[in-house]
Image: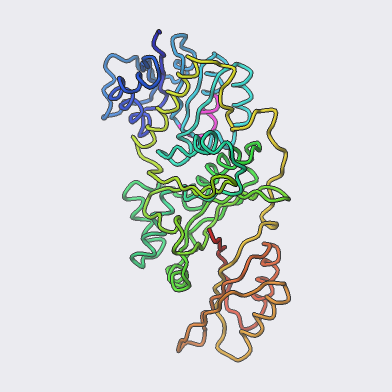
Amino acid sequence: MKPVKVGICGLGTVGSGTFNVLHRNADEISRRAGRRIIVEQVGTRRDHPNCDTKGTQVTRDIFDVATNPEIDIVVELIGGYDIARELVMTAIENGKHVVTANKALIAVHGNEIFAAAQKHNVMVAFEASVAGSIPIIKAIREGLSANKIEWLAGIINGTGNFILTEMRDKGRDFADVLAEAQALGYAETDPTFDVEGIDAAHKLTILASIAFGVPLQFDKAYTEGISKITTEDVQYAEELGYRIKHLGFSRRTESGIELRVHPTLIPATALLANVNGVMNAILVDGDAAGQTLYYGAGAGAEPTASSVVADVIDVVRTLTGDRDNRVPHLAFQPTELSDKPILPMNETETGYYLRLQAAEKPGVLASITKILGDNGINIEAIVQKETAEEQVPVILLTQRVKEWKMNEAIAAIEALDAIIGQVTRIRVEHL
């Protein structure tokens, strides 16, 4: 059969890795795909020192790739929202299949892109958009397709995981570790997307849509970052038998779908609690399979390229086979997506870790426990640290309760004369 011709847009870290893997493993890839795959053209603003593009067409205009009649598959690796969206839509309108690693693009514009792909009878593959080398989308969409997924939880941003690991292992503070993460290239100069949970929320939005068969709804994801986590919080969590992870969590409930990213206390013995450094992991709970864990490198040139090239192979296999029996983009047939709502954060239910500073005088703890009791909140553990200071740190663990109830309780606690400053709140999940 004639070779399938690929055009790569973007020759940065992932683009260069994809180019090199396609060339280095060309024979193995063709054996798996059933026909040869050729990089016909590359669209890039600048050449990459690790790529030898001799013999390959190179253009400085990425839209040349999207409109090139010789190209069968456009691989979008430029990142971002607007230009990437325009590039992908142009490729689809020109009858090209698309492979992308762009989680922001899929999370925000995926519904529109998939509708256009269906109209033009082409595929859009996006395995590399979530967790780099980990084939989590294929695992949920295909490997677990017999299951009713109950919930999933993931460490899906390596930068945040690196920071929290260093804070726990070495007692360092957030700002110090963030500076090192930037120096090592784990965090951007502006680290907002990583440390405030936006990057993880993009990925969680995609995973939840595939797991529960709902449209992509990034605008309804709750996000909270790790910049306010202190070394004291990390140490207190350890004393209580927990570890703090920046977790993406989505659960099916009778009322709707929980979709939230925030710092979370999880038991120190849990599998996810022992995922350290820049590594990623996703835990999925299905009614038939039970809990399954997917672990690996969440970023990097060739780890991410592994998923990009796997998508290219999948598209080639489909081109060779029956087009009418493709795996749906979001796992469920487009006409079967559910209108089950994404729950507002106030309606979600978790346990809580609370840390507060109280004046050293009688009756303070009794006042706090009364407020919690009046709001129907059961206490699981209390730690009051001895100190020679006039202020005493108090740490509480609560059982599960609706967020709105905890908000009311915290407001009442902060209104007490004996409470200094704001109450620190971190959610708790027993995974």
Query: Residue 34: x percent and y percent?
Result: 40, 16
State which region is magenta: 79-86
* Left or right: 302, with 362 as reference point: left
Front residue of 406 and 41:
406
> In front here: 3 or 218?
3
x and y, in percent, of residue 367 in the image: 66, 83
In this view of the protein, which residue sits in the foreground, 37 or 95?
37
Q: Main secondary structure of the magenta part?
A: helix
* Rendered residue at 68%/34% (across/down): 337
Q: Quadrant of residue 141?
A: top right
Is 283 placed left or right of 57 in the picture? right
- Colour style of the rendered protein structure: rainbow
At 70% from the left and 37% from the top, the residue drawn is 338
Magenta-drawn stretch contains 81: yes
Say if 125 sits above or below 270 in the image.
above
Residue at figure coordinates x 48%, y 36% from the top left? 129
